[in-house]
Every structure is written in structure tokens, then in C-alpha cells.
Amino acid sequence: MTSIIIPHYELHDMLKNFCLPNLYLYTDDSEIIIVDNGSKKALNLDGPYKIIRSKVRVSFARACNLGAEQAKGDVFLFLNNDVQVLPFFLEPILEALKDEKTVICGSKILAPDGRLQHVGISFGKKRLPYHEHMGEEDSKKFQGTKEVVAVTGACMAVKRDWFEKIGSFDEDFPDGNYEDVSLCLTAKKQGLKVKVALDSKVIHLGGATYGLHPEEHTELLVRRNWEILSEKWKGEKDSFFGINKNSLLTPREEAWGL
């Protein structure tokens, strides 16, 4: 069984009208757990959903871990509340996880206009993670399953036994950025695999919860969490992150003056 774990804050209408209808349709025997993470007005839902309520807002990592602590499945699928799954999204992910060495698998994520948002995460020249091919048109070249350095926690499936063995998401990250990348790097460090199932498709509004805060607040949050990630993994060589002489200096790395 798959346990789908959705950290959630405030945007109840979006969750009910955008995220949950397709999820209910296309996941017949999955357990759906929603972690209502400190919403001022408690979430109420009709349907076969398990709601965990945190009275105070905790980090994204902690909210995911709270859901995992009460999940029953042998695969945990972490899903953002602004994601809408498409038909047959789950089967390619579960197929990829049949490989003994693969412990994490993500989806192809599309923006609302159909362009690519995520087909895997790479690192820029200064070790800042970025989404490969973001903004490109989807095409037949983005099919099948490929091994990547990391995938986003917006739609990330993890084998339960491994997740519990390594101690879950790292709660040193104050909020939702790069705890997903750090989890993937932990798998890589152990000689295990992270994959993206490109035949699994979901639509991601992107940053819906962040939209509740000013843009400069979000940028500061991203910078702070990147500095935490950098400190945790500073002992690794550039090659560990897939960085070589041809790696690009990303726009955000330039903007930050790295």
C-alpha cells in the first residue's frame, strides 16, 4: 500500500478543489493523510482522509515526518497541497521503486501551462540546486525513467523501510526548501539511487503557500536553507553533486553573487 502524505496550511479551498479530487480518483487503495499544519481555521473534509492537526505551524520537514509517523504503507508519497495528479501517475513511480537500489522516485512535474517544471534536480557551479529543463516544452524525449541527483518534495515517493532507517526528513531545515535535496543526497552517499519516472505526470501550481508571504521573505528563506544544505554537505567533492567544468553558473547564483 502507498501512503500519500500532504503537508497543508491555510489554503483549504485549493486543497479541496484542485488537489484532492484527482487524487481520490486515481489512487484506489492508497491511504491519504493530510497534515493540517497550524491553519488558523481547522481543516474539515468529507471522505476517506486521515487528518493530523498540528496546533502550531511547524517546518515542512516536520509536517512530512508527522504524517509518516502515522502512515501504514510500505511507500510514502509526499505531495504538495498545490499539486494535481494526472491519470496513471502512480504506477510508473511504483514500477521504478521495484529496483532494489532505488529508494526515492519523483514525477515529471508540469506547470499549469503544460511546460516542464521538474524532470530532476541538478547543481549549479556554486552548488545551488536547480530544476533541469524548467520552462521547456514537454516532448517525447522526456519519457521513461532516469536516474538523477535529486527530486523535489512536491511529489516524492520514498521506500518506508529506508526512510525510517535513516531517520526521516532532516528537521534542521526551518521550512520548505532543500530538505528534499538533502534526503536525496543521503541516498546517493549510501550508494543508492534516486530516479524520476517521466511517464508519471502531475501539475504543480508552485509556491502557493509561499504566496501568503512577501516575495523577499521567500527569497531569504531559500537562501537560509541553501546555506544549511551547503554546510551539511561541504565535505563532498564537486563531482558528488554532478558538477564539472561544463556546469553552469545559474541565474540565482549570479544574483546572489556566489
Image: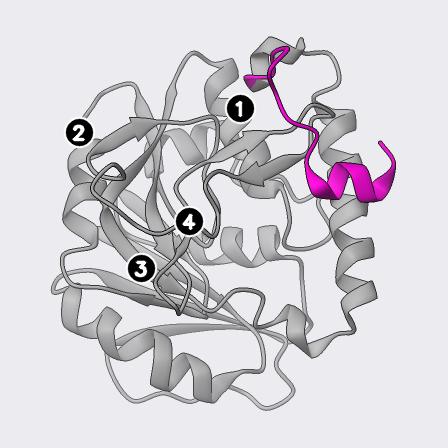
Residue at the outermost right position: 257
Q: Please tell me in which quadrant of the rendered image residue 56 appears.
A: bottom right
Question: Looking at the rendered structure, which numbered label has been put on residue 98?
Answer: 2
Are the residues at dot 1 and dot 2 in contact (C-beta closer than 8 Å)?
no
Label 2's element? Answer: loop
Pick whichever, 135 or 230, lies toward us.
135
Label of residue 202 in the image? 3
Q: Which of marks 1 and 4 is in front?
A: 4
Q: Name the residue under label 1.
A: 186
User: Which residue type does callout 2 highlight?
Assistant: Lys
Residue drawn at x 71%, y 33% is 229
Q: Distance between the residues labelled 1 and 2?
A: 19 Å
* Residue at disc 4, secondary structure: loop
Does the image show residue 97? Answer: no
State the separation of the CA atoms marked 3 and 2.
Answer: 21 Å
The amino acid beneath tag 3 is: Val
Q: Is the magenta stretch mostly helix, strand or loop?
A: loop
Q: How many labels were placed on the picture?
A: 4
Query: Which numbered disc, 1 or 3, marks the residue that appears first in the sequence?
Result: 1
Q: Which residue is drawn at 23% across and 73% down?
A: 22
N-terminal of the two: label 3 or label 2?
2
- Tell me the kind of residue under disc 4: Glu
Q: For this rendering, which residue is in front, 107 or 9?
A: 107
Quadrant of the image occupied by residue 216: bottom right
Q: Callout 4 environment at 10 Å: few (<14), some (14 to 19), or many (20+)?
A: few
